[in-house]
Amino acid sequence: MKPFNPVAVFVRGKRTGPVSPSTQKVVNQLSALSASRKQPRLLKLCDEDLIKHKTIMNAWTLYQRKKQQRQHEQLQKQYDSIQEAMEELKAISPRHYHWANKVEEKRFPLEMRVPTDYPADKPWVYNYKK
């Protein structure tokens, strides 16, 4: 009789190699198409718990709505205050009003690249014309 050996041996399943790009493309397309069906499950609650849940959700929605309304009112007051200050500035000093509302030109040309710590692969073309 053989002695009992308590060491467990784990065998892995068949390993698959890297997936070809065309297969990966199909997998991505299928997962994107089936994404709409992946909705969260409905809660399975008794009637009493369902009523509690709906009450809490309605209260939370009401709280969020009131909070958003307060923020909107505060921003509206700020906007009205700014408008009033600008009208007052226009009445007192039109020169300062126009200076405050002057449109600033762009500081850098759109074609200019962001400076980096490393030298560029392509040198900057200083005589660039559209």
Image: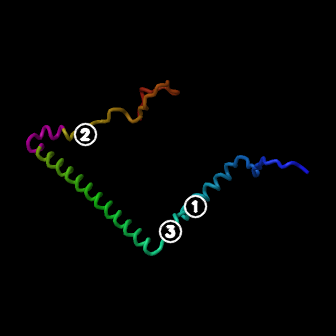
Which amino acid type is shown beneath numbered disc 2?
A: Val
Q: Which of 105 and 117 is in front in this view?
A: 117
Return the x and y of residue 57 as percentages of the image width and height. 38, 65
The residue carrying mark 2 is: 103
Earlier sequence position, callout 2 versus callout 3: 3
Residue numbers of the magenta segment? 89-99
Separation of residues labelled 2 and 1 (CA atoms):
48 Å
Q: Is residue 109 above or below residue 66?
A: above
**Residue 84 left/right relative to 114:** left
Return the x and y of residue 74 as percentages of the image width and height. 23, 53
Label 2 crowd bin: few (<14), some (14–19), many (20+), radius 10 Å: few
Nearer the observer: mark 2 or 3; the answer is 3
The residue carrying mark 3 is: 42
Which amino acid type is shown beneath numbered disc 1?
A: Leu
Earlier sequence position, callout 1 versus callout 3: 1
Q: Which of 42 and 99 is in front in this view?
A: 42
Q: Which residue is drawn at 17% across and 49% down?
A: 81
